[in-house]
Image (cartoon, rainbow, N blue to C red):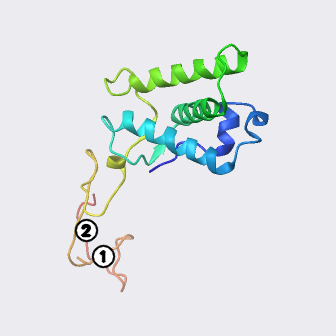
Amino acid sequence: MAEYCTTAQLTQYGIRAEALRTIDPSDLQAAIEAASDTIDGYLRSRYELPLVAWGKDITVICARLAVYQLVVVRGFNAARAGDEQIEKQYDVSLATLKDIPPGKYSPSVTDSSSAASPGASAPAGTVQVFSDSSRGYFADSRSQDGARPFQGRRF
């Protein structure tokens, strides 16, 4: 499973560092893993998982989902300005995820189907050349003894 953000990105995209100072690092990691699982639940319908690469949009969503989970566990007060903002970020992130399966939103991702694997066919529009044995053609059009073994058209 991919983890779509780091603990450092929690404070970069989700909450002030002071708010997380008293939270155990294993709890931060668990929140990131849970948020990443939630994201995978929405991506799974359109992309082959695991993702090979993703953009900041997915990283920000992961950080905001994880921060929300951490704040809810700590104790959430919707009347506090900071907590209200965290809830709004969570709602926007969840709405964005819900737009992925029907194709209303296309995140910046590269899924596993795009990764080259042994035995995979070449992408459309590319050329593959196969040869079982050397035919005597050389890059400088001369054989090893200096003669020109091939005078035909080069491709």
Left or right side of 123 for 55: right
In the picture, which quadrant includes the C terminus?
Answer: bottom left
Left or right side of 115 for 74: right
Which picture quadrant has residue 130?
Answer: bottom left
Which picture quadrant has residue 40?
Answer: top left
**Res 54 seen here:** no
Q: Look at the numbered disc 1 and give the secondary structure of its residue.
A: loop
Q: Residues within 10 Å of mark 2 (few under 14, many from 20)?
A: few
Question: Looking at the image, which is closer to me, 74 or 105?
Answer: 74
Residue where numbered disc 1 is placed: 148
**Res 51 seen here:** yes
Residue where numbered disc 2 is placed: 151
> Would you say the residues marked 2 and 1 are in contact, meaning their CB atoms lie under 8 Å apart?
yes
> Residue at horizontal 35%, vertical 56%?
116
Residue that extends furthest to the top in the rendered view of this protein: 79
Name the amino acid type tagged 2: Gln
Question: Looking at the image, which is closer to me, 108 or 33?
Answer: 33
- Measuring from the top left, give residue 86's x and y in whole percent: 63, 23
- Measuring from the top left, give residue 34's x and y in whole percent: 50, 41
